Image (cartoon, rainbow, N blue to C red):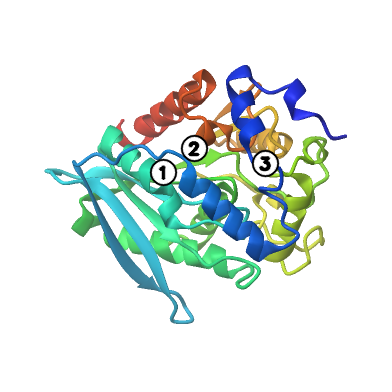
Amino acid sequence: MAIKLEDHVDAEYLSALKATPSDLLDLTDLTAARDRWRGFVAQMPAPEIADTIEISDHHTSAEDGHQILVRVYRRRQQPSRRGGLYSIHGGGMIMGNVAMSDARCAAVAHELDVVVASVEYRLAPEFPYPVPLEDCYRGLLWFFDQAEALGVDTARIAVGGGSAGGGLAAGVALAARDRQQVSPCFQLLTFPMIDDRNQTRSSYMIDDTRIWNRTANIAGWSAYLSGRNGAEDIPAYAAPARATDLAGLPPAIISVGSLDMFVDEDIAYAQALLDAGVPCELHVYPGAFHGSNFTIPNAEISQRWRRGEMAALGRALNG
């Protein structure tokens, strides 16, 4: 059953919710939705990128020859090996780009003194599964391969992302475990999009087109899985909630708001990781909706959320 967000949202998030365009995530017309989303993101105040951070663009080849962009953020003065974060942007599998995460990636590189690599994967429906997942996996291989040149310790490379990026990060972690070419040390999963079946209680909770909602989520999964979302044979790399064996995955932190339609699937995934013997830290933030921590970064919950994630990432990458 859907809820009225205004009755439950944290007070610091309420004004921003009310100011959000009512049709921001109405995906009836995907082209128009992508334009609205780009405009919304562009008007948000972005933190300045510290002048200590150097940003460089690199490319690696997909199997079909497509050139995958990997953007790297690191301190200009880097005298010794550092940990690394491989970051995957969100956007419901159908929107988003590397640029939208520039400030966040640069901030992680600056504050934790690590190297961050962010991948520009191809989007559905133009490029359905497995293309986005394989683009992300190829980018991760490149990051490990270039680690020495970038000053990165391959024993301290984490994978992470938010929303669709979190789902792709979880899928990449599964693929890395099974293919045994590289070994990420940690998973940073922010409200990950991991279950194409949309049958949890919370998957029915949000029908508000100002934020990621049930209809949008079904459309995103349908685009990613070529209309086969909910089918019995969807692989775990595509929808990690489908995984029946999570043993051997790297430790994780999962963070999600109580008003996020992903809250139930994310809690279930955290429990499944723990059941498989994988250390997992879970945070559910009351009164937070999907993306509110990014939209209103100065709110008390957002700051607490960020401190928790940065502390966990710092422990994983810097000891």
Q: Amino acid at mark 2?
A: Pro
Q: Amino acid at mark 1?
A: Cys
Pick whichever, 46 or 2, lies toward us.
46
Dot placed on the residue nearer the N-terminal end, 2 or 3? 3
| Residue assigned mark 2 | 251
Q: Which picture quadrant has residue 200?
A: top right
The answer to whether residue 279 is seen in the rendering is no
| Residue assigned mark 1 | 185
Task: Give the residue at the far right of this rendering.
Answer: 1
Q: Amino acid at mark 3?
A: Ile
Pick whichever, 50 or 261, lies toward us.
50
Say which quadrant the N terminus sits in.
Answer: top right
Residue 314 falls left or right of residue 92: left
Residue 207 falls left or right of residue 100: right
x, y percent for residue 20? 63, 38
Q: Is residue 283 above or below residue 224?
A: above
Q: Please tell me the numbered disc located at residue 301.
A: none
Q: Residue at x 53, y 31 (%)?
A: 293
Name the front one of labels 2 and 3: 3
x, y percent for residue 108? 34, 38
Could you give the CA–CA distance between mark 1 and mark 3, rounded to whole angstroms?
32 Å
Dot placed on the residue nearer the N-terminal end, 1 or 3? 1
Name the front one of labels 1 and 3: 3
Q: Which picture quadrant has residue 52?
A: top left
Q: Please tell me the numbered disc located at residue 211.
A: 3
Badge 1 crowding class, 10 Å Cα cut-off, few under 14, some 14 to 19, many 20 or more, is many
Badge 3 crowding class, 10 Å Cα cut-off, few under 14, some 14 to 19, many 20 or more, is many
Q: Residue at x 55, y 36 (%)?
A: 278
Tell me the element at label 3.
Answer: loop
Dot placed on the residue nearer the N-terminal end, 1 or 2? 1
x, y percent for residue 95? 58, 58
